[in-house]
Image (tube, rainbow, N blue to C red):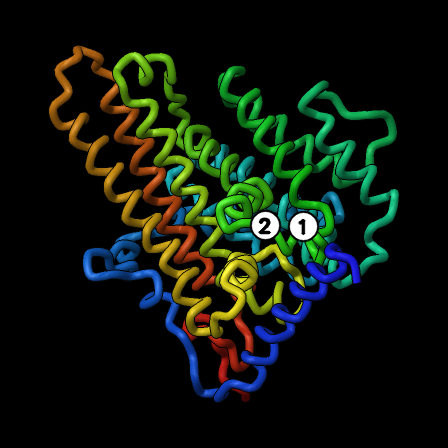
């Protein structure tokens, strides 16, 4: 047997071991995600307790639903995700909220149509049609115009992006569009069992997963949602850019890795998809049991929350002692930090709110449904 084949078999066996451990467990035995992600110095429930979704949740959801119907991008799962943008960006006004709702409706549609776990379950989706669609969507970074005879989803995507472009600064929009197209490229491809899975480190996976998730452009959208676009040169001049960039990256990582836990059963149990933190940890700690794999994976998220709180304290301290004479800088930075905190709170509360991750006999307390 070749080393490549042996590596693939090695991964497949571990994936099967995880699936069997969950199937054969005591069905009344569950893990609380809230407890897994909390520590002696950080209580996730308390951290998220004061969070409120957009006060315009209902009208924005209705507008987003109409947009999906208009461009025929509704799926059986659509009702599960219509509200997501209204949680991520609770401070957006109606106009900005509608544009963000459109963008996330398109993104979720593409995910559920041809996302990484869909490719794993349905190899037939790996057709030139879907490969070309991904190419057409990501080409917008090079030339921001619709191609001749575009599909309806391309038109919907372009309309959402046009709305965002028209209400933002050109420099910010260029950065955002590159992040969004990076996500389109990374998310819509096969992430099943392959030789690469046998050698992928946890750190490398986290980098890969961040791009797949779309969290970097989500974090960028905080500026759009408030209408306040940061002056990154001024932040660099004041020695704040390194901390802020690290904080933005930490929020993105927490968001995508939280989703790996909530999506674990859908992706790993149902689709045998390897693109999940718990399976990558399992491969890197091959002899460890399922409880040990869960604990190692949860500690990664706990450590990221610790990093967020540390950076939050450093940046808030600057705001408190600011003597630079930049009247707008502390105001703009404070607004952005609050947006980052709300985004992080939303990554937890929305996944509790939506029915997207609920299932009978879930391994997680927070997503478990009792059989009728």
Q: Are discs 1 and 2 less than 8 Å apart at CB?
A: yes
Task: Report the residue at 32% width, 51% height from top.
Answer: 303
Residue 225 position in % (x across, y down): 44, 33
SS class of the residue under badge 1? helix
Quadrant location of the N terminus? bottom right
Residue 267's image quarter? bottom right
Q: Nearer the viewer, residue 60 or 369?
A: 369
Residue 103 position in % (x across, y down): 60, 39
336 displayed left or right of 83: left
356 displayed left or right of 32: right
Residue 364's image quarter? bottom left
Does residue 364 lie above or below 73 as drawn?
below
Q: Nearer the viewer, residue 124 or 340?
A: 124
Q: Residues within 10 Å of mark 2 (few under 14, many from 20)?
A: some
Q: CA distance from mark 1 to mark 2?
A: 6 Å
Q: Residues within 10 Å of mark 1 (few under 14, many from 20)?
A: some
**For residue 196, which numbered disc appears in the image?**
1
Q: Nearer the viewer, residue 278 or 116?
A: 278
Task: Report the residue at 19% width, 56% height from top.
Answer: 41
SS class of the residue under badge 2? loop
Residue 88 position in % (x across, y down): 44, 45
Q: Nearer the viewer, residue 9 or 94?
A: 9
Does residue 182 lie above or below 309 as drawn?
above
Quadrant location of the C terminus? bottom right
Is there any visible trace of residue 59 in the rendered image? no
Is there any visible trace of residue 197 in the rendered image? yes
Task: Report the residue at 18% width, 26% height from top.
Answer: 318
Residue 283 position in % (x across, y down): 56, 61
Write down the residue under mark 2.
Answer: 200
Does residue 155 lie above or below 363 as drawn?
above
108 displayed left or right of 176: right
């Amino acid at each position: 047997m070749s080393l490549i084949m042996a590596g693939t078999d090695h991964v497949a066996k571990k994936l099967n071991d995880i699936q069997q451990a969950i199937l054969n467990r005591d069905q009344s035995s569950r893990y609380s995600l809230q407890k897994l992600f909390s520590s002696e110095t950080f209580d996730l429930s308390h951290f998220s307790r004061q969070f409120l979704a957009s006060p315009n949740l209902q009208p924005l959801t209705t507008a987003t639903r109409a947009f999906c119907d208009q461009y025929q991008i509704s799926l059986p799962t659509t009702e599960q995700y219509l509200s997501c943008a209204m949680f991520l960006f609770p401070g957006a006004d109606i106009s900005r909220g509608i544009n963000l709702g459109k963008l996330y409706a398109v993104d979720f549609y593409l995910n559920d149509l041809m996302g990484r776990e869909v490719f794993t379950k349905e190899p037939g989706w790996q057709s030139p049609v879907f490969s070309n669609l991904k190419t057409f969507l990501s080409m917008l970074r090079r030339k921001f115009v619709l191609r001749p005879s575009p599909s309806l989803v391309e038109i919907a995507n372009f309309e959402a992006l046009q709305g965002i472009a028209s209400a933002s600064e050109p420099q910010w929009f260029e950065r955002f569009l590159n992040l969004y197209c990076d996500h389109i490229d990374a998310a819509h491809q096969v992430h099943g069992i392959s030789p690469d899975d046998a050698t992928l480190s946890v750190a490398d996976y986290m980098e890969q997963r961040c791009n797949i998730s779309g969290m970097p452009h989500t974090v960028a959208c905080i500026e759009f949602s408030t209408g306040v676009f940061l002056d990154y040169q001024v932040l660099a001049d004041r020695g704040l850019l390194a901390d802020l960039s690290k904080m933005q990256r930490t929020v993105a990582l927490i968001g995508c890795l939280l989703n790996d836990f909530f999506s674990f059963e859908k992706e790993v149990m149902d689709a045998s998809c390897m693109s999940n933190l718990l399976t990558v940890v399992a491969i890197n700690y091959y002899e460890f049991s399922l409880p040990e794999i869960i604990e190692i994976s949860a500690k990664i998220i706990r450590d990221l929350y610790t990093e967020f709180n540390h950076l939050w304290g450093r940046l808030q301290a600057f705001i408190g002692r600011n003597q630079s004479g930049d009247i707008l800088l502390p105001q703009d930075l404070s607004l952005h930090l609050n947006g980052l905190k709300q985004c992080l709170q939303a990554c937890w509360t929305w996944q509790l709110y939506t029915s997207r991750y609920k299932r009978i006999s879930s391994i997680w307390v927070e997503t478990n449904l009792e059989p009728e």
